Image (cartoon, grey):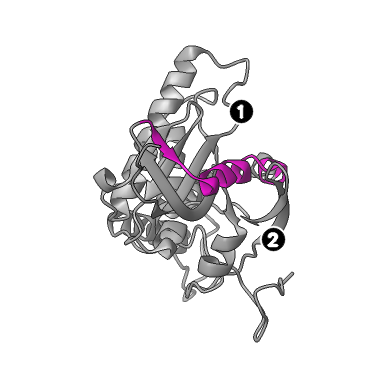
């Protein structure tokens, strides 16, 4: 019997693109999407201060398998890495056509991984790929305008999400996952807008209002002694403040709130889900 190296612990990230095989898409679209996703994942890892060469990564056609070394806190993967990934995908989509745009389902788990000359293998990897194929996760992403939907394993939820110190106003909720012979539980986090989503709200809503205010005919002359406040000063301040916030968050990587852990009632246990 062949001798193999002992299994080693890794955080498992599986990324899968939504509707990659849409018949309207050509090979050109597929190549652009694959290149864009690989670049987005690599930049998200680097911007999270995780060494890309230390991560094992495999192209899976319409997605990726990423194994992150054990010295990287799993809470960093949950909050910082996924926050950057959502922004990178959103930025990519802003530069490409609708048919070449990317929306992804992401699954997080962890386990003991065996390496050989052909790649990697582990039951935990198999389970993570089944998590990312959960029908509830597909439906969650389909209903969302945002580019990323997340599911975590039951182990990851109870060992990482539950103990994360970052507060949230969003809840994970449990869903059944078919793991070929047994039914496991995954926990879905609702998609949330990235900062670039919010910037587009500013451009698409606030700026037209500002333009309308600035181009409106001047009001009737104020009565003597009455002070008339500038018409658009507060809107300009609002736009500038939102822009500064977005640019600041992009320049200085901080723990993201795009994928916060679960909110729970005071004194509740891990199995007491808060509605």
Relative to 264, does residue 128 appear above or below in the rendering? above
Please state the extent of the stretch shown in magenta in the rendering.
118-139
Relative to the observer, which residue lies in front, 94 or 213? Answer: 94
How many marks do you count on the picture?
Answer: 2
Q: Residue at x 62, y 46 (%)?
A: 131
Please tell me whether residue 125 belongs to the stretch shown in magenta: yes
Q: Which residue is mark 1?
A: 19
Relative to the observer, which residue lies in front, 52 or 79? Answer: 52
Relative to 111, does residue 135 appear above or below in the rendering? above
Q: Position of residue 192 (x, y in %)?
A: 56, 54
Q: Residue at x 38, y 58 (%)?
A: 240
Where the C terminus falls, by quadrant?
bottom right
- In space, the residues marked 1 and 2 are separated at their CA atoms by 24 Å
Asked whether disc 1 touches disc 2, contact meaning CB atoms under 8 Å apart, the reply is no
Q: Which residue is mark 2?
A: 173
Mark 1 crowd level (few <14, some 14–19, many ≥20, 10 Å Cα): some
Say what secondary structure mark 2 lies in: strand
Q: Residue lying farthest bottom?
A: 267
Please tell me whether residue 250 belongs to the stretch shown in magenta: no
Observer able to see residue 210? no
Relative to the observer, which residue lies in front, 242 or 257? Answer: 257
**Label disc, if present, on residue 68 of the rendered structure:** none
Say what secondary structure mark 1 lies in: loop
In-image side of 100 versus 274 (left or right):
left
Q: Position of residue 177 (x, y in %)?
A: 70, 48
Quarter of the view holding residue 43: top left
Where the N terminus falls, by quadrant?
top left
Relative to 148, does residue 264 appear above or below in the rendering? below
Q: Position of residue 68 (x, y in %)?
A: 37, 51
Q: Main secondary structure of the magenta part?
A: helix
Q: Residue at x 36, y 37 (%)?
A: 116
In-image side of 119 versus 139 (left or right):
left
């Amino acid at each position: 019997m062949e001798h193999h190296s002992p299994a080693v612990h890794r955080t498992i990230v599986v990324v899968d693109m939504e509707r990659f095989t849409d018949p309207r898409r050509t090979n050109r679209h597929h190549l652009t999407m694959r290149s864009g996703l690989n670049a987005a994942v690599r930049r998200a890892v680097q911007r999270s201060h995780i060494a890309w060469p230390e991560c094992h990564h495999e192209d899976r056609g319409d997605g990726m398998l990423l194994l992150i070394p054990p010295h990287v806190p799993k809470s960093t993967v949950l909050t910082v890495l996924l926050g950057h990934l959502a922004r990178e995908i959103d930025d990519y989509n802003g530069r490409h056509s609708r048919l070449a745009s990317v929306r992804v389902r992401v699954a997080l788990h962890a386990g003991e991984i065996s390496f050989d000359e052909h790649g990697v293998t582990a039951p935990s990897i198999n389970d993570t790929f089944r998590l990312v194929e959960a029908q509830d996760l597909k439906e969650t992403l389909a209903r969302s305008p945002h580019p990323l939907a997340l599911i975590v394993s039951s182990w990851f939820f109870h060992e990482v999400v539950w103990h994360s110190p970052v507060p949230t106003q969003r809840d994970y909720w449990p869903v059944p996952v078919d793991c070929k012979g047994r039914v496991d539980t995954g926990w879905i986090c609702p998609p949330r807008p990235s900062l670039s989503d919010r910037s587009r709200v500013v451009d698409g809503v606030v700026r037209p209002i500002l333009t309308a205010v600035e181009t409106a005919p001047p009001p009737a002359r104020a009565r003597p002694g009455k002070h008339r406040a500038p018409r658009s000063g507060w809107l300009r301040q609002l736009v500038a403040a939102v822009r500064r916030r977005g640019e600041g968050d992009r320049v200085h990587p901080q723990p993201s709130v795009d994928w916060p852990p679960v909110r729970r009632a005071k004194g509740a246990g891990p199995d007491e889900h808060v509605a």
